[in-house]
Image (cartoon, rainbow, N blue to C red):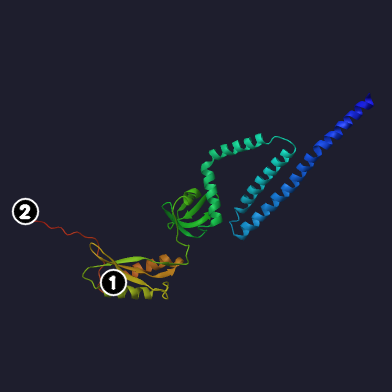
């Protein structure tokens, strides 16, 4: 009887081995190939991001995220090969992901926006931008926030989601810019003389690009002044230097040549009937 029992266990073991060996072998192959493929794709993604000069702080995060996601999928596939019901695991993971997503939906939106900013680069560190009613130089681009330094040296922290969902003006995007300025002269003053003086002041500024045309024209007839627009070209980094130079030197040149810069004023007429009352 003992021999018969031992042979029965042995036969059962052989039958189980024959029955489950394809699943075990398939699961092992799935794990080996899947882990190798996830590593290969992660390295490929890293090379692509480095080639596109994505921010170095973002590359490890993205490659790790892709690697972990792929490995979880491989493990679930291997478990399915063993005959383990994975539907409940997928549902559990999905429910957990949904709960975390709802709890962190604000931060996740800023995270996604930060990834898009670092990949597509609508602005870079050092650029001067205007967004969400703030203007400043970009000092850091982080995963969740962008840090600006204003002209008066204030630090502004703006969530990345706010930037991508609102208008953004990158004043450093182009290497050259026009410097739009308007100077008012009095109605009795000579327009042609004023335009000649404005051109002379422009020619005296070394930071203006003299090989480019300088636009000088009457832009409007105001309530108390004739407004003349001046638009010279300069390098983007010299924008404020040119603007400040022109404001000071035009005032001096107008004063020297007897051209007044009027200010808003109001004429009050008093009737005799009012005085008698």
| Residue nearer the viewer, 119 or 61 | 119
Instruction: Look at 63% across and 37% down and name the residue there.
Output: 93
Q: Position of residue 99 (x, y in %)?
A: 57, 36
Instruction: Look at 27% across and 75% down and name the residue there.
Output: 192
Give me the disc on residue 160.
none
Give me the disc on residue 273.
2
In the displayed structure image, the side of residue 56 where residue 74 appears, left or right: right
Q: Alpha-carbon neighbours of circle 2 within 10 Å: few (<14), some, or many (≥20)?
A: few
| Residue nearer the viewer, 89 or 214 | 89
Which of disc 2 and disc 1 is earlier in sequence?
1
Check whether the beta carbons of the residues at disc 1 and disc 2 lie within 8 A of each other: no
Q: Position of residue 165 (x, y in %)?
A: 46, 50
| Residue nearer the viewer, 24 or 75 | 24
Local SS, label 1:
helix
Q: How many numbered marks appear?
A: 2
Q: Name which quarter of the figure residue 178 lies in.
A: bottom left
Q: Name which quarter of the figure residue 199 lies in.
A: bottom left
Instruction: Look at 62% across and 53% down and name the residue there.
Output: 59
1 or 2: mark nearer the eye: 2
Residue carrying label 1: 254
Tell me if residue 156 comes above or below residue 262 in the rendering.
above
In the displayed structure image, the side of residue 2 where residue 251 appears, left or right: left
């Amino acid at each position: 009887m003992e021999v018969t029992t031992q042979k029965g266990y042995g036969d059962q073991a052989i039958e189980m081995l024959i029955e489950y060996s394809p699943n075990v072998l398939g699961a092992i192959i799935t794990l080996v190939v899947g882990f190798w493929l996830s590593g290969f794709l992660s390295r490929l993604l890293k090379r692509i991001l480095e080639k596109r000069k994505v921010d170095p702080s973002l590359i490890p995060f993205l490659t790790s995220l892709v690697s972990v996601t792929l490995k979880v999928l491989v493990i679930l596939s291997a478990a399915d090969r063993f005959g383990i019901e994975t539907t409940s695991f997928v549902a559990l993971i999905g429910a957990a992901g949904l709960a975390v997503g709802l709890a962190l939906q604000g931060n996740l939106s800023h995270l996604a926006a930060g990834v898009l900013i670092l990949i597509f680069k609508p602005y870079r560190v050092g650029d001067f931008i205007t967004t969400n009613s703030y203007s400043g130089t970009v000092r850091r681009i982080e995963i969740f926030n962008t840090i600006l330094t204003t002209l008066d040296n204030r630090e502004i922290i703006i969530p990345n989601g706010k930037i991508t969902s609102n208008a953004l003006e990158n004043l450093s995007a182009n290497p050259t810019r026009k410097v739009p300025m308007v100077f008012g002269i009095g109605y009795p003053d000579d327009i042609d003389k004023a335009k000649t003086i404005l051109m002379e002041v422009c020619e005296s500024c070394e930071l203006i690009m003299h090989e480019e045309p300088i636009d000088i024209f009457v832009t409007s007839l105001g309530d108390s002044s004739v407004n003349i627009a001046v638009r010279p070209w300069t390098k983007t980094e010299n924008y404020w230097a040119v603007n400040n130079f022109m404001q000071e030197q035009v005032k001096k040149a107008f004063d020297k040549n007897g051209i007044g810069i009027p200010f808003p004023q109001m004429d009050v007429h008093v009737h005799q009937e009012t005085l008698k009352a």
